[in-house]
Amino acid sequence: MPFDITVLGTASATPTSTRHQSAQLVNLLGRFFLIDCGEGTQMQLRKSKIKIQKINFICISHLHGDHYLGLVGLLSTMNMLGRKKTLTIFAPKGLDKIIELHFKFSYSNLTYELNIVNLQGAKLVSLHEDDACQLFSFGLKHRVPCWGFKLIEKQRPKKMIKNMIEKYSIPFNSINDIKSGSDYINNKGEIIKNNLLTTSSYTPRSYAYCSDTLYFPSLVRHIQDVDLLYHEATFHSDLSSKAKSTFHSTAQDAAKVALQGNVKKLLIGHFSSRYKDLSVLKIDAEKIFNNVDLAIEGKKFKIRKYIKR
């Protein structure tokens, strides 16, 4: 069952000839979440052979243009392709007015319903939940209201050991309870322990996305122990004063968050156009945290399954 992240855009404020503005597509068990939507996002989706009509949720971190100016074009394309399904957008207050104004003056009517939910609060807030996953937002520190996002997979049921069903003559109507962790009591009143009847499912996986932000220690509590953390790393640490003045992070700031949060892997992006060779940012982060990768456009990062012991 997939939990993977496709990188679509990695540039900061200005795109380059090789880097587009911020966007990622997360596939969590067939649920598609687009996180940020800078210019060129729909073209990047096409290049990655991702069907845009599969997207049911869009998360916009903040209203700086490099994170949302590709959105109206994407919505228009969905419309021209005859979309019918409701599209939910989680975004800062005001995006609804921007979208409304565009379609009003272009005399356009969407073929589908937009459900726009305003982000609010600095704490961890649940935005969406279904039987397989949960989506959260949390506040960041930038020049404008800005949020990060976290996706957590729910615990999968245990698996029955087939020959145990026959051995203990377990009826069909008891199997779901056993998969949920219950022991089995047979018709003689004997208790057969759950660990004899089942094998454990894998540990639920998790991903966090930290968009534009100044480094602040309390961010750690929101991303604690995630399998994969994406964190902006606009500058090298030798430009830490510039990072602070612009409310951005350095590669080492991102690494500190990863280390303090005990995350398994760090993915850095939102690179300043001044860096032609991105390896200098990776090396900078690795001085603090040893499992770092660069967000390279078109690359897919798969979150592995770990079996509980």
Image (cartoon, grey):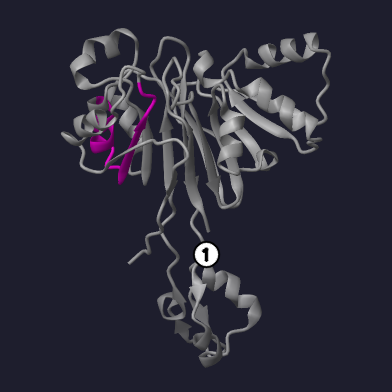
Q: Is residue 266 magenta?
A: yes
Q: Camera-side residue: 60 or 53? A: 53
Q: Is residue 189 visible?
A: no
Q: Residue furthest front?
A: 17
Give the image quarter of residue 226: top left
Residue at the image position 55 percent from the left and 42 percent from the top: 48
Q: In this view, does 25 lie above or below 237?
A: below
Where residue 39 sits in the image (x, y, percent)? 56, 21
Where residue 273 sits in the image (x, y, percent)? 36, 18
List the residue tagged with mark 1.
157
Where residue 186 sits in the image (x, y, percent)? 54, 86
Q: Camera-side residue: 130 or 192? A: 130
Q: Is mark 1 on a helix, strand or loop?
A: loop
- The part of the chain drawn in magenta is 253-271
Where residue 170 sits in the image (x, y, percent)? 58, 85
Total tally of numbered discs in the picture? 1
> Is residue 246 shown left or right of residue 159?
left
Q: Camera-side residue: 197 or 105? A: 105
> Is residue 200 shown left or right of residue 177?
left
Q: In this view, does 218 lie above or below 81?
A: above
Q: In this view, does 7 lie above or below 252?
A: below
Q: Is residue 259 magenta?
A: yes
Q: Can residue 276 be seen in this view?
A: yes
Q: In which quarter of the image is the C terminus?
A: bottom left
Q: Is residue 181 above or below residue 30?
A: below
Residue at the image position 52 percent from the left and 64 percent from the top: 157
> Is residue 105 shown left or right of residue 308?
right
Give the image quarter of residue 262: top left
